Amino acid sequence: MNVHRWLSRFAAVCLVLQVSSAEAEVVAQTLRFSSVVIDAGHGGKDGGSVWNGLVEKKLCLDVAKRVETGLKAHNLKTVMTRRGDVFVELEQRARIANRVPSSIFVSIHFNGSRKTIISGGEAYYRSPRGKILAAAISRSIKSSVTGGTRGVFFADYKVLRETEMPAVLVECGYLSNKREALRCADPTHRQKLADAIVSGLLAVRAR
Protein backbone atom coordinates (compact mmCIF):
# COMPACT_ATOMS: atom_id res chain seq x y z
CA MET A 1 0.00 0.00 0.00
CA ASN A 2 1.47 3.36 -0.93
CA VAL A 3 1.80 6.15 1.59
CA HIS A 4 -0.92 8.34 0.09
CA ARG A 5 -3.50 5.55 0.18
CA TRP A 6 -2.55 4.67 3.77
CA LEU A 7 -2.89 8.30 4.86
CA SER A 8 -6.25 8.53 3.12
CA ARG A 9 -7.57 5.47 4.94
CA PHE A 10 -6.14 6.68 8.24
CA ALA A 11 -7.89 10.02 7.83
CA ALA A 12 -11.17 8.25 7.06
CA VAL A 13 -10.90 6.11 10.18
CA CYS A 14 -10.16 9.19 12.28
CA LEU A 15 -13.24 10.93 10.87
CA VAL A 16 -15.44 7.95 11.72
CA LEU A 17 -14.05 7.88 15.25
CA GLN A 18 -14.70 11.61 15.64
CA VAL A 19 -18.29 11.25 14.46
CA SER A 20 -18.85 8.24 16.71
CA SER A 21 -17.41 10.14 19.66
CA ALA A 22 -19.64 13.15 18.93
CA GLU A 23 -22.71 10.92 18.65
CA ALA A 24 -21.85 9.21 21.92
CA GLU A 25 -21.52 12.59 23.59
CA VAL A 26 -24.95 13.63 22.34
CA VAL A 27 -26.48 10.42 23.68
CA ALA A 28 -24.75 11.01 27.01
CA GLN A 29 -26.38 14.41 27.25
CA THR A 30 -29.96 13.08 27.20
CA LEU A 31 -32.12 11.87 30.06
CA ARG A 32 -35.27 9.81 30.20
CA PHE A 33 -38.03 11.25 32.36
CA SER A 34 -41.79 11.66 32.24
CA SER A 35 -42.28 13.78 35.35
CA VAL A 36 -40.65 16.89 36.79
CA VAL A 37 -40.62 17.68 40.50
CA ILE A 38 -40.61 21.47 40.80
CA ASP A 39 -39.28 22.81 44.06
CA ALA A 40 -40.06 26.44 44.82
CA GLY A 41 -37.34 27.45 47.26
CA HIS A 42 -38.02 28.72 50.80
CA GLY A 43 -41.60 29.55 51.88
CA GLY A 44 -43.52 30.32 55.06
CA LYS A 45 -41.20 31.40 57.88
CA ASP A 46 -38.22 31.12 55.51
CA GLY A 47 -38.33 34.13 53.23
CA GLY A 48 -34.95 33.54 51.63
CA SER A 49 -33.06 36.56 50.30
CA VAL A 50 -34.70 39.94 50.83
CA TRP A 51 -33.22 42.77 48.80
CA ASN A 52 -34.45 45.91 47.05
CA GLY A 53 -38.04 45.35 48.17
CA LEU A 54 -38.19 41.80 46.84
CA VAL A 55 -38.70 38.60 48.84
CA GLU A 56 -37.15 35.50 47.35
CA LYS A 57 -39.81 33.00 48.44
CA LYS A 58 -42.51 34.85 46.48
CA LEU A 59 -40.48 34.98 43.28
CA CYS A 60 -39.51 31.31 43.59
CA LEU A 61 -43.15 30.22 43.76
CA ASP A 62 -44.12 32.51 40.90
CA VAL A 63 -41.45 31.11 38.57
CA ALA A 64 -42.14 27.54 39.72
CA LYS A 65 -45.81 27.85 38.76
CA ARG A 66 -44.84 29.29 35.39
CA VAL A 67 -42.46 26.37 34.83
CA GLU A 68 -45.25 23.95 35.73
CA THR A 69 -47.57 25.55 33.16
CA GLY A 70 -44.88 25.34 30.48
CA LEU A 71 -44.07 21.69 31.17
CA LYS A 72 -47.73 20.68 31.19
CA ALA A 73 -48.11 22.29 27.78
CA HIS A 74 -45.56 19.71 26.58
CA ASN A 75 -47.48 16.84 28.19
CA LEU A 76 -45.06 16.35 31.05
CA LYS A 77 -46.35 15.41 34.49
CA THR A 78 -45.42 17.76 37.32
CA VAL A 79 -45.28 17.63 41.10
CA MET A 80 -44.83 20.76 43.20
CA THR A 81 -43.15 20.59 46.62
CA ARG A 82 -45.24 23.60 47.65
CA ARG A 83 -48.09 25.53 46.05
CA GLY A 84 -48.53 28.24 48.64
CA ASP A 85 -46.60 30.28 51.18
CA VAL A 86 -45.78 27.34 53.44
CA PHE A 87 -42.55 26.14 55.01
CA VAL A 88 -41.33 22.73 53.81
CA GLU A 89 -38.27 21.10 55.35
CA LEU A 90 -35.47 20.25 52.94
CA GLU A 91 -35.71 16.55 53.85
CA GLN A 92 -39.43 16.59 53.07
CA ARG A 93 -38.78 18.15 49.67
CA ALA A 94 -36.43 15.28 48.87
CA ARG A 95 -38.91 12.68 50.14
CA ILE A 96 -41.65 14.14 47.95
CA ALA A 97 -39.36 13.93 44.95
CA ASN A 98 -38.17 10.40 45.66
CA ARG A 99 -41.74 9.10 45.53
CA VAL A 100 -42.17 10.22 41.92
CA PRO A 101 -41.07 7.58 39.37
CA SER A 102 -39.21 8.45 36.16
CA SER A 103 -38.62 12.01 37.31
CA ILE A 104 -36.10 14.81 37.55
CA PHE A 105 -35.88 17.48 40.26
CA VAL A 106 -35.63 21.24 39.67
CA SER A 107 -35.24 23.59 42.63
CA ILE A 108 -35.86 27.26 41.87
CA HIS A 109 -34.22 30.09 43.81
CA PHE A 110 -33.04 33.69 43.58
CA ASN A 111 -29.72 34.87 44.98
CA GLY A 112 -28.30 37.64 47.13
CA SER A 113 -24.83 38.88 48.03
CA ARG A 114 -23.20 41.70 49.93
CA LYS A 115 -21.19 42.22 46.76
CA THR A 116 -24.06 43.95 45.04
CA ILE A 117 -22.21 44.23 41.75
CA ILE A 118 -22.69 40.48 41.15
CA SER A 119 -25.49 39.53 38.77
CA GLY A 120 -26.62 36.64 36.60
CA GLY A 121 -28.16 33.23 37.03
CA GLU A 122 -26.37 30.11 38.26
CA ALA A 123 -27.10 26.39 37.97
CA TYR A 124 -25.90 23.88 40.56
CA TYR A 125 -25.57 20.09 40.37
CA ARG A 126 -24.13 17.26 42.45
CA SER A 127 -24.30 14.19 40.18
CA PRO A 128 -23.16 13.65 36.57
CA ARG A 129 -26.77 13.43 35.42
CA GLY A 130 -27.60 16.55 37.39
CA LYS A 131 -24.79 18.30 35.55
CA ILE A 132 -26.56 17.53 32.26
CA LEU A 133 -29.64 19.40 33.51
CA ALA A 134 -27.60 22.28 34.91
CA ALA A 135 -25.67 22.76 31.67
CA ALA A 136 -28.80 22.65 29.52
CA ILE A 137 -30.68 25.17 31.66
CA SER A 138 -27.64 27.44 31.86
CA ARG A 139 -27.29 27.42 28.06
CA SER A 140 -30.97 28.18 27.64
CA ILE A 141 -30.96 31.10 30.09
CA LYS A 142 -27.77 32.50 28.58
CA SER A 143 -29.26 32.51 25.10
CA SER A 144 -32.70 33.90 25.88
CA VAL A 145 -32.77 35.87 29.15
CA THR A 146 -31.34 39.32 29.81
CA GLY A 147 -28.57 39.07 32.39
CA GLY A 148 -27.51 35.60 31.30
CA THR A 149 -25.76 33.22 33.67
CA ARG A 150 -22.54 33.00 35.64
CA GLY A 151 -22.17 29.32 34.80
CA VAL A 152 -22.61 25.81 36.14
CA PHE A 153 -21.23 24.76 39.54
CA PHE A 154 -20.95 21.69 41.74
CA ALA A 155 -22.62 21.98 45.16
CA ASP A 156 -23.48 19.65 48.03
CA TYR A 157 -26.88 21.18 48.80
CA LYS A 158 -29.19 18.87 50.74
CA VAL A 159 -31.91 18.85 48.09
CA LEU A 160 -29.30 17.72 45.56
CA ARG A 161 -27.66 15.23 47.92
CA GLU A 162 -30.83 13.52 49.14
CA THR A 163 -32.78 13.31 45.89
CA GLU A 164 -32.34 10.03 44.03
CA MET A 165 -33.03 11.32 40.53
CA PRO A 166 -31.11 13.81 38.33
CA ALA A 167 -31.39 17.10 40.20
CA VAL A 168 -30.51 20.74 39.64
CA LEU A 169 -30.81 23.94 41.67
CA VAL A 170 -31.31 27.08 39.60
CA GLU A 171 -30.50 30.54 40.97
CA CYS A 172 -32.47 32.86 38.69
CA GLY A 173 -30.57 36.05 39.49
CA TYR A 174 -29.20 38.30 42.23
CA LEU A 175 -31.85 40.36 44.01
CA SER A 176 -29.01 42.27 45.67
CA ASN A 177 -28.08 43.81 42.33
CA LYS A 178 -30.41 46.76 41.76
CA ARG A 179 -30.54 46.41 38.00
CA GLU A 180 -31.22 42.70 38.20
CA ALA A 181 -33.76 43.19 40.97
CA LEU A 182 -35.72 45.51 38.69
CA ARG A 183 -35.75 42.80 36.04
CA CYS A 184 -36.81 40.11 38.51
CA ALA A 185 -39.68 42.28 39.71
CA ASP A 186 -41.10 42.24 36.18
CA PRO A 187 -43.50 39.33 35.47
CA THR A 188 -42.37 39.36 31.82
CA HIS A 189 -38.79 38.66 32.89
CA ARG A 190 -39.92 35.89 35.23
CA GLN A 191 -41.85 34.32 32.38
CA LYS A 192 -38.71 34.36 30.24
CA LEU A 193 -36.83 32.66 33.06
CA ALA A 194 -39.51 29.98 33.30
CA ASP A 195 -39.56 29.49 29.53
CA ALA A 196 -35.77 29.13 29.50
CA ILE A 197 -35.87 26.50 32.25
CA VAL A 198 -38.54 24.57 30.37
CA SER A 199 -36.58 24.79 27.11
CA GLY A 200 -33.45 23.55 28.82
CA LEU A 201 -35.25 20.54 30.25
CA LEU A 202 -36.87 19.69 26.94
CA ALA A 203 -33.51 19.96 25.17
CA VAL A 204 -32.09 17.01 27.12
CA ARG A 205 -35.20 14.87 27.34
CA ALA A 206 -34.79 11.54 25.54
CA ARG A 207 -37.95 10.59 23.66
Image (spheres, helix red, strand yellow):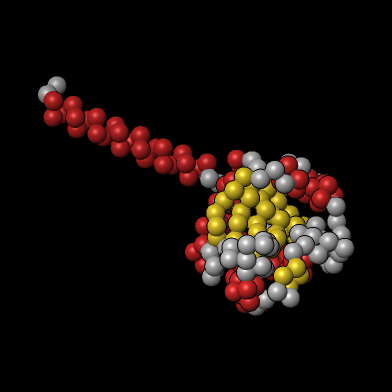
- Quadrant assignment, res 108: bottom right
Residue found at the very far front of the displayed protein: 114
Whether residue 14 sits left or right of residue 185 in the image: it is left
- Tell me how many marks there are: 0
Is residue 72 at least partly visible in the picture?
Answer: no
Whether residue 33 sits left or right of residue 39 in the image: it is left
Q: Residue at x 61, y 71 (%)?
A: 180
Q: Position of residue 1 (x, y in %)?
A: 14, 21
Q: Position of residue 96 (x, y in %)?
A: 82, 50
Q: Residue at x 69, y 67 (%)?
A: 63
Q: Is residue 13 above or below residue 190?
A: above
Q: Residue at x 47, y 41 (%)?
A: 25
Q: Position of residue 30 (x, y in %)?
A: 55, 46
Who is closer to the viewer here, 183 or 34? 183
Q: Position of residue 127 (x, y in %)?
A: 64, 40
Q: Is residue 60 above or below residue 2?
A: below
Q: Residue at x 73, y 54 (%)?
A: 37
Who is closer to the viewer here, 30 or 87? 87
- Quadrant assignment, res 112: bottom right
Residue found at the very far top of the displayed protein: 1
Is residue 42 at least partly visible in the picture?
Answer: yes
